[in-house]
Amino acid sequence: MFHPKSFVLIHGAWHDHHSWDFVVPVLENAGHLVTALDLPGAGVTAKYPSSYLRRPFDLEAFTAEHSPNANVTQEERTDAVITAVRELNARSSSKAVLVGHSLGGLTVSHVAEAISDELSAVVYCSALMLPSNMLHTQMNAHETMSGRLTPNLEIGDPVKTGVMRFNPKSDDPNYRALVKAAFYADVTEERFQLALSYLIPDEPAQVTTIPSPITKKNFGRISRYYIQCTQDNAIPLAAQQEMVSLVDADMNNATTVHSLESSHSPFFSHPEEFAQVLKEIVES
């Protein structure tokens, strides 16, 4: 007998709930319940530097301006997702599956550690899944991250601006080509343009300064899955594999790994295949 499951979907850096627009209908049509939310500092809650919207555009001002988005904390994001999980669990006959992409993996770990009893599984899609006490900056400095393209997109000094900043509205064809190569290499031009329309320029930097909180007692007892994106230019495959190895050793148990032949954004390039992996995880 089929038993519907529930999913809470967490987007990555500079993105919002629209990341999941092509995935949610597939899951819902299969009978599952889905919540895709905007993290604090993203989507409808994002705040923009005035220089980003001003025309003519002043790159120098944009590079230097402190962001009104800088004060967003990881605690706020953790609390927002916990609320979403509890609301969905109240509507469902099952505990939610928490799915995170890219930088959203940091929030997955914090939430899973905090409310492990209220989740049935966690799924990381080419996401930051860090062992206990590791910082985002430490993983970024690992040799497996050396080939990533995202540093070439970032503008300004995060210490001064308070954010990781890039320009999704850039009219520089070389810069736009780099955005596509980093995040959407196998995404159609139409969907690439759609993705750009939803992106924000400022990702709060302080969410990356909190060490991974996971413990064997809490996080370690939740079923754990990792969806590798083999053609990823933002988090290279070798880095994805390294994080799985590190966390498996830290938790003394194994992550179940799935692979998609995709860029960093399978929810845009292969949404049906991505949704199928999620369905297999909960229906197996």
Image (cartoon, grey):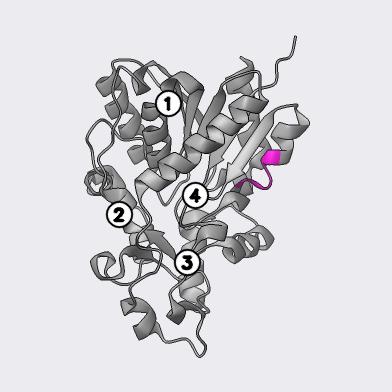
The span from disc 2 to disc 4 (Cα, nearest Å) is: 14 Å
Residue 42 seen in the current view:
yes
Please name the amino acid that badge 3 sits on. Lys
Residue wearing tag 1:
115
Residue wearing tag 4:
39
Mark with earlier residue (2, 3): 3
Q: What secondary structure do most residues of the magenta stretch adopt?
A: loop
Asked if the residues shown at circle 2 and circle 1 are in contact, with their CB atoms under 8 angstroms apart, the answer is no
Q: Residue at x 68, y 37 (%)?
A: 272
Left/right of residue 24 with respect to residue 219 in the rendered view: right
Asked if the residues shown at circle 1 and circle 4 are in contact, with their CB atoms under 8 angstroms apart, the answer is no
Please name the amino acid that badge 4 sits on. Leu
Residue wearing tag 2:
206
Mark with earlier residue (3, 1): 3
Vertical side of 91 occupied by 127: above or below: below
Mark with earlier residue (2, 4): 4
Please name the amino acid that badge 2 sits on. Gln
Left/right of residue 201 with respect to residue 140 in the rendered view: right
Residue 23 lies within the magenta run = yes
Q: Residue 182: percent from the left, percent from the top?
A: 45, 57
The span from disc 4 to disc 3 (Cα, nearest Å) is: 12 Å
Residue wearing tag 3:
47
Left/right of residue 139 with respect to residue 280 in the rendered view: left
Mark with earlier residue (4, 3): 4
The span from disc 2 to disc 1 (Cα, nearest Å) is: 22 Å
Q: Which residues are magenta?
A: 20-24
Residue 277 seen in the current view:
no
**Could you say which is closer to the camera, residue 229 or residue 76?**
76
Mark with earlier residue (1, 4): 4
Residue 149: name its quadrant.
bottom left
Q: Residue at x 47, y 86 (%)?
A: 57
Residue 279 lies within the magenta run = no
